[in-house]
Image (cartoon, rainbow, N blue to C red):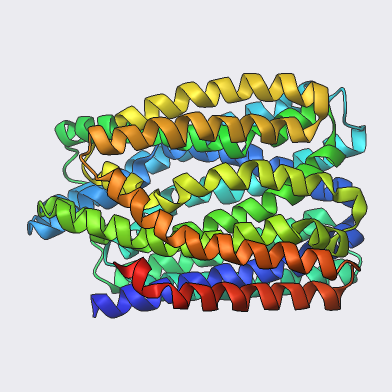
């Protein structure tokens, strides 16, 4: 049954990514046309601020998953109940702290953005912040029930509900916009659906046998969890610096329109990361189990297998974007957003390497050896902020993308591959030999991409679709022809 859950969960994850990507492609220009580029920029900016607020989670969600699986595998049912109660109390306390922090951000927001925001933009930004903040604060205690479902590998339910909400949300949004409602009402509708998802998680976790007890608060295990979670928290902080700070910096120094341009470029990288993490995210409980059973060789084989699959998918997407991305942006939102293409490329290309190794992060966390990565990423993330502030003043939003790309090369590619090989004893030489085998079809397909751009030069939907279709078919055929060499 668990195998079916994994397979179907992975399949649903890919469907979710595909559907959400398609919806985002069609919904974004509609959103900009009805609400305007400034409202789109405001929404993106507040989401970045919410990213920082969400760090109050402190990495405890990952810790709860790890220790819940550990207790269940060893038959410690009472300890699991106490653990659930302890985490619920902690998350309720974090929710209260979040309320205080949210109030401070709300008060200070006009001071921070006053130079490049109009009074109307500030007013709307604060309204959207309050709405999103309510949703975030509720997610802290309700996350306990979501984690309980994940720990039992019940992915079909979780993915199914998520898919339903992803489809329903833009339908409601379009209905509201067509009937004259604005950004505030559209945001409220999204939050209502999110809260509905939390309620479903609560009742389903109870059905699965979720039990809780507040009779024992184990400070010894809390200390152990705190040490483990601290470095998870650093990872979350680093990710937020990479993906959220840029828009805040751009908003402060350039205004909401520049934020919108950068956000359009970020859409592609968000989808790109989603395709890579769909499989590794579903495998997190399985990897934790393998490590807890001292089956590290099996965990590495899983890392290698997943990395190869991720590379094949990401190589198709990234090479296709290199050849046809600029044309797509022109057809999608117009020539004035061409800068979004270069923003996406500066992040997408160096991001490919850490994405195909994303399962390695899960292995590190399961082995409780993620501390080094956290420290290295934190140092490079701080340098990334400094570079971003300097470059955004010089070349606008593109400067933030350049700084992020350079940070990836030094931290997530060079240093981490050495760490995987030397410290975790993961054979990265073998890993890269396998990836190089997969690179042959990519190089051959790239010749086809150059050829298509040379002879189909008129920018229209028909030519664009023909290029995409031919390129994808050729890529798949070449990969199939080389399959024996790839599988060696």
Q: Is residue 479 above or below residue 53?
A: below
Task: Find residue 55 and report its horizontal and vertical position in percent.
Answer: 49, 36
Residue shown at 45%/45% (left/top)? 354
Task: Find residue 50 and report its horizontal and vertical position in percent.
Answer: 61, 41
Task: Find residue 111 and report its horizontal and vertical position in percent.
Answer: 78, 21
Residue shown at 36%/63% (left/top)? 282
Residue shown at 45%/29% (left/top)? 377
Image quadrant where one finds the N terminus: bottom left
Task: Find residue 415 and report its horizontal and vertical position in percent.
Answer: 39, 30
Residue 183 or 153: which is nearer the viewer?
Answer: 153
Q: Is residue 114 left or right of residue 20?
A: right
Question: How many numbered callouts?
Answer: 0
Residue 456 or 203: which is nearer the viewer?
Answer: 456
Residue 83 or 458: which is nearer the viewer?
Answer: 458
Quadrant hosting residue 417: top left
Residue shown at 49%/32% (left/top)? 237
Q: Is residue 160 visible?
A: yes
Point out the residue furthest to the left here.
75
Quadrant hosting residue 451: bottom right
Image quadrant where one finds the C terminus: bottom left
Q: Is residue 279 above or below residue 263?
A: below
Residue 46 or 418: which is nearer the viewer?
Answer: 418
Q: Is residue 129 visible?
A: no
């Amino acid at each position: 049954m668990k195998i079916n859950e994994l397979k179907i969960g992975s399949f649903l994850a890919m469907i979710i990514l595909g559907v959400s990507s398609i919806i985002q492609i069609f919904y974004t220009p509609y959103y900009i046309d009805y609400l305007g580029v400034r409202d789109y920029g405001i929404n993106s900016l507040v989401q970045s601020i919410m990213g920082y607020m969400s760090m109050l989670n402190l990495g405890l969600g990952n810790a709860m998953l790890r220790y819940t699986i550990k207790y269940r595998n060893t038959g410690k049912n009472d300890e699991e109940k106490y653990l659930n109660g302890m985490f619920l109390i902690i998350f309720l306390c974090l929710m209260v702290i979040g309320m205080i922090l949210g109030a401070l951000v709300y008060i200070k927001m006009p001071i921070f953005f006053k130079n490049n925001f109009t009074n109307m933009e500030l007013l709307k930004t604060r309204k959207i912040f309050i709405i999103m903040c309510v949703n975030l604060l509720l997610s802290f205690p309700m996350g306990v029930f979501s984690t309980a479902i994940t720990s039992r590998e019940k992915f079909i339910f979780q993915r199914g509900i998520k898919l339903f909400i992803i489809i329903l949300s833009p339908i409601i949004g379009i209905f509201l916009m067509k009937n004259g409602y604005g950004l505030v009402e559209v945001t409220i509708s999204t939050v209502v659906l999110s809260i509905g998802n939390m309620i479903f998680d609560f009742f389903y976790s109870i059905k699965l046998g979720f039990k809780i007890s507040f009779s024992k608060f184990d400070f010894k295990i809390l200390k152990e969890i705190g040490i483990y979670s601290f470095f998870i928290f650093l990872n979350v902080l680093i990710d937020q610096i990479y993906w959220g700070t840029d828009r805040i910096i751009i908003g402060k120094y350039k205004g909401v329109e520049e934020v919108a341009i950068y956000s359009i470029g970020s859409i592609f990288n968000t989808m790109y990361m989603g395709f890579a993490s769909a499989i590794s995210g579903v495998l997190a409980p399985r990897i934790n189990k393998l490590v807890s059973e001292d089956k590290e060789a099996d965990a590495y084989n899983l890392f290698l297998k997943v990395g190869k699959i991720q590379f094949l998918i990401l190589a198709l997407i990234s090479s296709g974007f290199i050849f046809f991305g600029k044309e797509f942006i022109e057809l999608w939102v117009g020539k004035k957003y061409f800068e979004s293409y270069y923003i996406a490329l500066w992040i997408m290309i160096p991001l490919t390497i850490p994405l195909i190794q994303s399962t390695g992060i899960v292995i590190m966390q399961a082995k409780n050896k993620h501390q080094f990565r956290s420290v290295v990423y934190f140092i490079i993330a701080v340098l990334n902020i400094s570079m971003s502030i300097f470059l955004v003043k010089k070349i606008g939003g593109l400067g933030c993308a350049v700084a992020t790309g350079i940070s990836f090369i030094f931290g997530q590619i060079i240093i981490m591959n050495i760490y995987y090989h030397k410290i975790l004893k993961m054979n990265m030489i073998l890993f890269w030999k396998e990836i190089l085998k997969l690179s042959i079809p990519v190089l051959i397909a790239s010749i086809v991409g150059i050829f298509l751009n040379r002879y189909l030069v008129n920018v229209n939907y028909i030519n664009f679709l023909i290029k995409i279709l031919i390129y994808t078919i050729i890529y798949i055929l070449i990969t199939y022809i080389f399959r024996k060499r790839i599988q060696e």
